[in-house]
Amino acid sequence: MMKTFNELLEQVKSLPMKKVAVACAQDDAVLEAVKAAKDMGIADAILVGDEAKIKTIADVLKMNIKDYEIIDVKDDYEAALTAVKMVHDGEADMYMKGLIDTKSFLRSVLDKEVGLRTDKTLSHVAVFDIKDIDRLLFMSDVAFIPYPDLETKANIIRNTVEVAHACGIANPKVAPLAAVEVVNPKMECTVDAEKLTQMCENGEIEGCVVDGPLSMDLAIEPEAAYHKGTTDRKIVGDADILLFPDIDAGNITYKTLVHTADAVNGNILTGTKAPVILTSRSDEFDAKVNSIALAAVVANNLA
Amino acid sequence: MMKTFNELLEQVKSLPMKKVAVACAQDDAVLEAVKAAKDMGIADAILVGDEAKIKTIADVLKMNIKDYEIIDVKDDYEAALTAVKMVHDGEADMYMKGLIDTKSFLRSVLDKEVGLRTDKTLSHVAVFDIKDIDRLLFMSDVAFIPYPDLETKANIIRNTVEVAHACGIANPKVAPLAAVEVVNPKMECTVDAEKLTQMCENGEIEGCVVDGPLSMDLAIEPEAAYHKGTTDRKIVGDADILLFPDIDAGNITYKTLVHTADAVNGNILTGTKAPVILTSRSDEFDAKVNSIALAAVVANNLA
């Protein structure tokens, strides 16, 4: 079982080298991560964007630019469409955001001709490796879907389970989170959590164990489960996947972890034909490299 | 300005000694915290409950039971009413939960004859001292009010501002949190956040600065504000008070901090005639002592 990002990086190195197509690659932080990913044997890259600017940044970073395929497209959106089409056509395995606004980037992901849309729900998965937690935690949705209804939550779980499977977790435990661990008709997310648990028992959600509602402590801390007497549940502080009630809870928790925990993370957009990496400028270097590694593992599973 | 719980503990020691009335004091974890609070000069205690059991536990803890007033009431709810009445009558300064279920304890808080109800909204305040954050963070509501409407959110802010004032923070910065830092009509909490900001500008919420919506990173991490170019806002990663959109977001964040951050915390119920301490068995010893200290500071301000 996958325990840490270091182990995930090792897993990726053992796989056939994947290729990431970068939209508007003239971004120092993105190029730095792409260079590290290549140096570590995690992924090769195709750099689409303003070639002159890319080369200037590459010089500063002491990147050997001859090792990379560069496609010169000056217009940002044209560059995105060019990059995403390479993934769409199978010339690259994953798609990464460079120096382009998120809205335009997502529009290219969703483009009907050359984009990566499938009939699945698009959702975001954040993966955390937290000190003193002996496994990776997969969290969704903390960035993309605002207020999912029951069916959307089921789809979010399905997407996230696929990512966990790709990371070697055969039968992940999924905790639909709430403020409490019992159903309360006045708290909609607890009602949904129970329905999702039943959907898993009925075989409507496969490849995982769902047990909710659960509070955060009962989901991640075995001691809390012993304290509160919930050791008869399917999840006893050993959840792999955390399903958030909505984007407010998810995003606030995500940023709390980034800024207060001893943790590293990586994130991808999934439910697409190929994994999409849309880390932001404020993400740390590690998060960018981890995201490429996560995408590579998922791409390998899709291949 | 108050920066850490250690400084808060020092502040309390300089105040006239406060007295906590404990409902059903026959609880080892509670008595341990009460003993520590007395030994540290933070608070004296009146122990209401099963005297024989209290004495047995006191023996184990090597507590000098003669130093404490004990009132022998075997029935749990009677014990709670006896203890809360002492606070109601001014014989004690704060009210603490012992070995009694939360529902009965809260019923005693709300008792019309001898309870601590006021015309204010009752709300919960969690105070965190987090490593690498140079001030205390006051969070509400993570445990008591499920889905506050706009007016209730304003009342939660008013209650929490009073607690911050008691802790020596003259003009706390209040961040109504959301997943984003801009108003989006489809995200109700961002609309509320803007209205709360206006209510503060209009003088409807006093003694603080409100600036929302804000994402968690922009509320607590100055660097994130520089990265994202929000340095022209009233809050630039320097919020004192975090208002959560709802209990799901609040509680999940609270438990994430408890279980993953290098942090200590204390919690009280406020909006009452006197501060109420209802820590749970799963709370750490430190959290219980910190909660008594926090209650003592607030009680001193009410006196």
Image: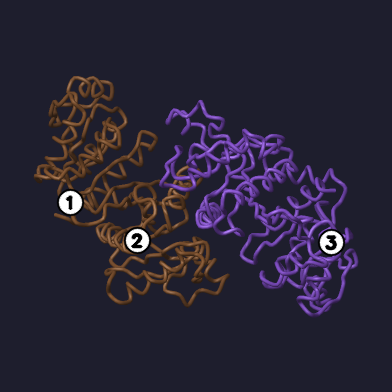
Chain colours: A brown, B purple
Q: Which residue is the site of mark 1?
A: A273
Q: Mark 1 lies on which chain?
A: A
Task: Name the residue rendered at 54%, 53% in the picture.
Answer: B250
Q: Tell me if mark 2 has few (under 14), some (14-19) or many (20+) residues whose alpha carbon lies within 10 angstroms of its own.
A: many
Q: Which residue is the site of mark 2?
A: A153
Q: Is residue B273 above or below residue A181?
A: above
Q: Where is residue A63 in the image (x, y as percent from the top left)?
A: 23, 27
Q: Position of residue A250 (x, y in %)?
A: 43, 52
Q: What residue type is labelled 3?
A: His
In this view of the protein, which residue sits in the foreground, A298 or B241?
Answer: B241
Q: In this view, does A240 lie to the left or right of B133?
A: left
Q: What residue type is labelled 2?
A: Lys
Task: Name the residue rendered at 67%, 42% in the picture.
Answer: B4
Q: In this view, does B123 lie to the left or right of A260?
A: right
Q: Position of residue B50 (x, y in %)?
A: 81, 77
**SS for callout 1:** loop
Q: In this view, does A242 lie above or below B49?
A: above
Q: In this view, does B156 lie to the left or right of A246?
A: right
Image quadrant where residue B80 sits: bottom right
Q: Which residue is the site of mark 3?
A: B88
Can see residue A43?
Answer: yes
Are the residues under badges 3 and 1 in a single subunit? no
**SS for callout 2:** helix
Q: Tell me if mark 1 has few (under 14), some (14-19) or many (20+) residues whose alpha carbon lies within 10 angstroms of its own.
A: some
> CA–CA distance between discs 3 and 1?
65 Å
Q: Tell me if mark 3 has few (under 14), some (14-19) or many (20+) residues whose alpha carbon lies within 10 angstroms of its own.
A: many
